[in-house]
Image (cartoon, helix red, strand yellow):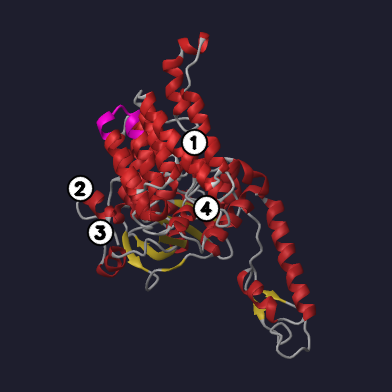
Amino acid sequence: MLCGYIRRVTSETGDPLSGLTDPVRRLLAEPPVMEPKLLELRAIWPRLTPVQSMMADALRMCMITWDPLELHSPRPAAFGTVNTGPLELAVYLPFWSPAEQGTTIVALLSAVASAAVATAAARHPAVTSGRYPQLVWQGAAPDLLSDLTSGAALGLAAIELVSPGWEDIGLGAIADIVQQAFGPVELDRSMVELTAGYHPGCPACQGSRFGFPAELAEATDTMCRSHRSEAQKVIRGRMNRAKASNAEGWAALSDASARLGRSHLPNGLATKLANADEAMYVTPEPRELASRARLVIEAASWFPGRPQDLAIALGEDPAMAVLLPDWLMNLVLQLGRVGLGAEAIAVAEALSRVDPENAAIFYGDVAVALAEGGLAEDARARVADNLARWPGDLWVRIHAGDAIAALGDRVGAWAHFEAALAMAEEAGDLPGRSDVMERIISLEPRSGAETSSESDAQHQSTRPPQPVVRYQQRKRQSRAQRKGRR
């Protein structure tokens, strides 16, 4: 569904689908935004020079619902590169780009197509020779889409369908997009034909040819022993040569290919949230956090009851995605620290819909966030609500003490921590007991220099040092513990 896309563009430019033919309009009105799909389109101009016409014939333009390099922020509005054998100007436009550029789909498609054709025509010897991608990577030639106004003289293009519907994004599209960003990766994707053999049931012995890499990899299990070994040697050899040609590009290609079948966020949300983990230990400015809160709420709305899928869509390793990412688990508290109490509540509500099992964690953080934001009455009300809803939850009780301590009520905080200590000891929860004791010690009177700075230190010492890590100690290793295993 177009959902928020339609609403945003309509308010700025009118109908985002205006100017499109009915067949194109119907397909773009209901894009499969939660699946990695592409729709191939054709651009047609009334008058072109012979060289421009040759480049227009070579243009292969697709709208995409998923950017394979979405985690490499920032990303351009569109991506284009040149392939040869046969000549191809491969251009990709993310479905959400027109909205972000404040224009209609047909206007941006026309600008992108015109820029690619005009740029390629102006440098056609390098384009037709196959040298252009390397020249771009070396900085000796402009990216096909570096200037979206460069093809303005061609006029507005008519946009027509090439593919009958949305199709799966495959390795070819991923390789094009990686080449635009990281330069050429010399991955030999030609058909593979293995040596003749005589084992019945072996497709290689029967003379079959295999596409690379998917078809060959899938067929190896059905091959005879000698052909299986030969196929694996071909796979290793081609992949090693690709890696040697461009290690960074090969890593990006491998990562994007691995994530192709995983959960992903629509509308470029993953790119907008790609660097959020950098704020784990440094609180960003309020405006940035407010924007991040809105993005998180939107992202969470696509994954009700599916915390692991949301974590994977945000870039977490599937093998490690037991809980939501650390930065996301910490977001409610960060919002409170900069006085964004309403946003903290909204994020907690959104995350609780994604991960109902951990709702107590999110609402416990809300109590602290409201207290640290100076909303005393709201914080006390939230503490009372949380204790009524989760009377036996250790961290709800601990956070009740954290919130009350942040309000300057040492006696009230002490009472909550004493209750939490009893709960931890009764349950035999040694890590929990340790966390409670740290808080109790932090409330004890100080003397000397410590006493003189007590009012400043109290706020910091009573705050949970790393609230996310305490949850992960229950269910998974912390990020620091996992780094060495990646």
Circle 2 — which element?
Answer: helix
Q: CA distance from mark 2 to mark 3?
A: 13 Å
On the image, the x and y values in percent for residue 230 come to: 77, 73
Amino acid type, callout 2:
Ser
Comparing 276 with 72, the one in front is 276
Q: CA distance from mark 4 to mark 2?
A: 41 Å
Comparing 218 with 349, the one in front is 349
Where does label 3 land, which residue? 17
Q: CA distance from mark 1 to mark 2?
A: 35 Å
Residue 96 visible, this orientation: no
Sequence-wise, the earlier of marks 4 and 2 is: 2
Where does label 4 land, which residue? 124
Amino acid type, callout 4:
His
The residue range painted magenta reads 369-378
Residue 7 visible, this orientation: yes
Mark closer to the observer (4, 1): 1
Numbered tag placed on residue 325 in the rendering: none
Mark closer to the observer (1, 2): 1
In the rendered structure, are the residues bearing label 2 and label 3 in contact, judged by CB atoms less than 8 Å apart?
A: no
Where does label 1 land, which residue? 280
